[in-house]
Amino acid sequence: MAKVCRTPREAGAPRWAAAKVARIVEWIVKQDYCFSKGGCNEFARGNTGTDFFDEASDTTRCRFLASFLATHTPSLDETFISGSCEMRKKPVDPEDDENERFAVPDVITHQPGMRMEFYEIKPNSDSGRRAGRTKIETFLSLTDFLAQTDPNFVKYEMGTQFDPDRSIVFYRRNYLGIVPCSVSLHYRRATEPEITKGLIVYEICVEVDGELLEALAKAIIVSAIIAALVALALIAAELFGAILAPALLVFNSPMGGSVGPDGNNDSQDVRFLQALINDWRDSTGDSLIAVDGSFSEETAGALAEFQAASGLEDTAGSLTPGDVTETALETTHLNNVFAAADLGEMQPDGLGAFVFREDPDGVDPELEEEQDQQTAFNAFVQQYLQDVRDNV
């Protein structure tokens, strides 16, 4: 059994998709955190809840944090706290997956004498852990200042009582028909010597029987992220309309030339074709063909079978880049990817709306590859297909 773990960005996901994964993690960690402490009294503006969760409000992060702190210490200057937080307009770390601009912890609990602690959630990469430490130190600086200026303020400590180490499988399939795999979200409290407290780190892990090359591991992780986002977008569509809709997918051919009896038959193009055929054949229970980069009678026959089964007019066992045969093969592969998502362990009720709702802080155009989510998703799928073609 081989296992490879990477953060979304390390696997090749664009920043916007990595940020959506971060929201998924925040949702799951919140459920786990509340379960571990016997329930939460969640804070919202206007109530006196003792458990603060970032991005759970109808206002900006900084104003939400200021409201929480001032609610539990009324003598604090709420406007000052909000303004001090919002002074950090630049990202904490340009290399961090989420590239956040505000030092607001993801979880804070205010229970004097029992639990006065906070946690930050970050991807388990060098840049993610570094950004997490920076946020923790920045928040500690704020609380140090508040404690010095207001004797009523009780300081928060870096959290240790919540100590998770959990893996949640959310994607299973025979990848490209030949690689039985499972993909899981893994999160834990950071135990590195330079951290030790207050930081929860996460990564996406793929497990297969046998050898697992880096390029294949990344492709499987990216396919799992795509599948999870599509599944959640379908759930959220009832509230927000079509988001990341498979029916609206538009992508260009990643192939360099034609494949067939009279085709160019570049070996990488042929391998890509053979892999997609195997993905289809596995889903129908048929035997697989060789993925060797050599266009043979076996490959031509299998391609002709796919064309006939798909109701295509051309059943000659050949294709050219971007024609209906290639589009049908790639669409079949993507549909198999989408169908492999299994979010049951994530407790998905409400998760789609949480992941895709509008950010109260708005979108920073300097941090996003695309403004339109469907366009960004199309580009994500395009890059995924290109990587599969180049590395299969």
Image (cartoon, rainbow, N blue to C red):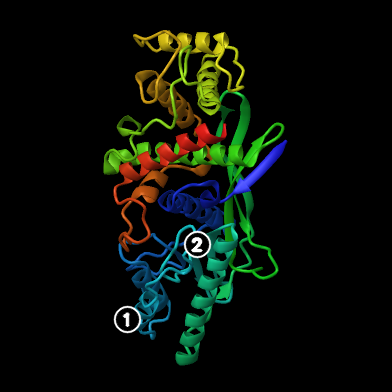
- Element under disc 1: helix
- Residue at image coords 42%, 12%: 307
Q: What's the CA distance linking mark 1 and mark 2?
A: 31 Å
Q: Label 1: which residue?
A: 79
Quadrant location of the C terminus? top right
Left or right of 235? Residue 26 is right
Left or right of 60? Residue 121 is right
Residues 192 and 308: in front is 308
Which amino acid type corresponds to the residue marked 2 in the rendered image?
Glu
Mark 2 Cα within 10 Å, few/some/many (few <14, many 20+)?
Answer: some
- Residue at image coords 53%, 16%: 281
**Where is residue 119 shown, x and y percent of the image?**
54, 66
Residue 95 numbered tag: 2
**Where is residue 262 shown, x and y percent of the image?**
46, 13
Which amino acid type corresponds to the residue marked 1 in the rendered image?
Thr
Quadrant of residue 176 within the rendered picture: top right
Is 307 above or below relative to 131?
A: above
Q: Nearer the viewer, mark 1 or mark 2?
A: 2
**Where is residue 175 shown, x and y percent of the image?**
57, 29
- Element under disc 2: loop
Quadrant of residue 326 within the rendered picture: top left
Residues 325 and 292: in front is 292
Quadrant location of the N terminus? top right
